[in-house]
Amino acid sequence: MNLTNFFSKIFGIKVESKGELMKKFLIIGLGNIGEQYVNTRHNIGFKILDEVAAEYNVTFETEKLGDVAAFRFKGRTFILLKPSTYMNLSGKAVKYWMDKENISVENILVVTDDINIDFGVIRVKGKGSAGGHNGLKDIQEKLNTQQYARFRFGVGGNYGRGRQVDYVLGEWNKDETSEFIERLPTSAKVITSFGTAGLNNTMNTFNGK
């Protein structure tokens, strides 16, 4: 009997093996809580995770530092996290749930908006700077690394000088809303691909799509 089975049998507790831990993924959708932010460009991370949860018929529950849902797919466990800390403090929730679920940085994926990418374009990367994004900046500071995967969904940069904040906190226009809804199923596939096919295959399959 191995140690995992021993502790499970003797103490009645679930002890996850190394293999099980490697198959567990934390997917973080960035956004701001509150009705006034629901349909804003900055909440793209929440929207994409909502699409994934609906597809796999799971419901978010309010937990410490965020709303959380989980499902299994092809032998992998996906934990979806929508931080309740507001965008600028996202790193606190990410670090807490990584520690709680014993998930390594290689198995996290952060879903966020990006004003430097054309609207609707997908870009997955395994590392990089925060690029001026306050949510990514806080995650980088709390994890003390830039070496984590991120899924950037382009929201475009159609705003005047000094209007960046108004733009990202503004709501989608009618045309964007229609196109955005069409992009949600593909965006959901990025999430499960990351856990099942791996980062490199996911980048090759979806980047620029």
Image (cartoon, grey):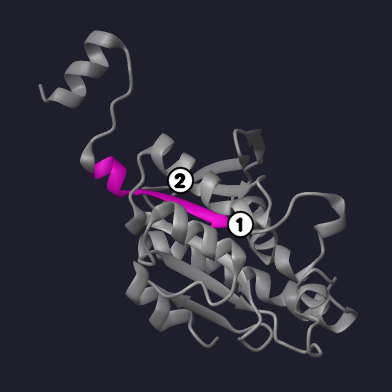
Tell me where residue 158 sits by quadrant: bottom right
**x then y, percent, for residue 169:** 80, 68
**Stretch of the chain drawn in magenta:** 19-29
The image quadrant that residue 113 belongs to is bottom right
| Image: 122 above or below 27 | below
Residue at x 29%, y 41% (from the top left corner): 20
Look at the image and tell me in which quarter the N terminus lies: top left
* Place of residue 4 in the rendered image (x, y in percent of width and height, measured from the top left): 20, 26
Q: Residue furthest front?
A: 162
Taking the image as shown, residue 24 lies to the left or right of residue 40, namely left
The residue at 38%/72% (across/down) is: 127
Percent coordinates x, y for residue 56 in the rendering: 59, 50
Q: Which residue is mark 2?
A: 95
Label 2: state its secondary structure: helix
Amino acid on which the number 1 mark rests in the picture? Val
Residue 163, picture quadrant: bottom right
Q: Quick one: SS at disc 1?
A: helix
Residue at image point 56% right, 80% down: 122
- The circle on residue 52 is 1
Residue drawn at x 54%, y 45% is 93
Say what amino acid the circle numbered 2 marks: Lys
Callout 2–callout 1 Cβ contact below 8 Å: no
188 drawn magenta: no
Mark 2 or 1, nearer chain start: 1
**Mark-to-mark CA distance, 2 and 1:** 22 Å
Q: Is residue 25 magenta?
A: yes
Foreground disc of the pair 2, 1: 2
